[in-house]
Amino acid sequence: MATVIIPTPLRKFTNNTAKLIINAGNVQDVVNDLSLNFPELKRHLLDENGKIRSFVNVFVGDDDIRDLQQENTSVKEESVISIVPAIAGGVK
């Protein structure tokens, strides 16, 4: 089962859980599981077409899924999936 790292800004939607263990074959399965078990998280991860939002970065290990097979990127038992939403702001 893969380990999913939930970033601090999204933990309020996962009962303050930082890591989840999910049985999944690919990234889409991971996102579907998260959306099913944490419905409030879904709108932060997926757009109206059910695709991962453009400002949400997903990594399998150190690899950005955009450089791999997107949502179809395989997930192994030892995989660590990191969700990294873009954070707006900065210094003016």
Image (cartoon, rainbow, N blue to C red):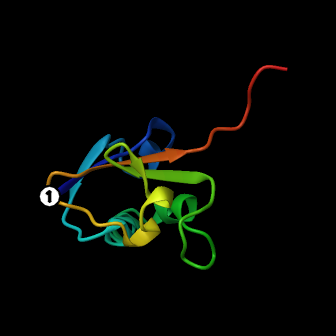
Q: Looking at the image, which residue is at 20% across and 56% down? A: 2
- Of the pair 71 and 12, the residue shown nearer to us: 71
- Of the pair 12 and 32, the residue shown nearer to us: 32
Label 1: few (<14), some (14–19) or many (≥20) C-alpha neighbours in 10 Å: few
Q: x, y percentage for residue 62?
A: 36, 42
- Of the pair 72 and 89, the residue shown nearer to us: 72
Where 23 sits versus 16, above or below?
Answer: below
Q: x, y percentage for residue 79?
A: 22, 52
**Which residue is outermost to the top?**
91
| In this rendering, position of residue 56 left or right of residue 2 | right
Q: x, y percentage for residue 88?
A: 70, 37
Quadrant of the rendered structure where residue 31 is? Answer: bottom left
**Which residue is outermost to the bottom?**
49
Q: Amino acid at mark 1?
A: Glu
Where 40 sits versus 85, above or below?
Answer: below
Q: What residue is pinned by disc 1?
A: 77
**Which residue is outermost to the right?**
92
**Which residue is outermost to the front?**
67
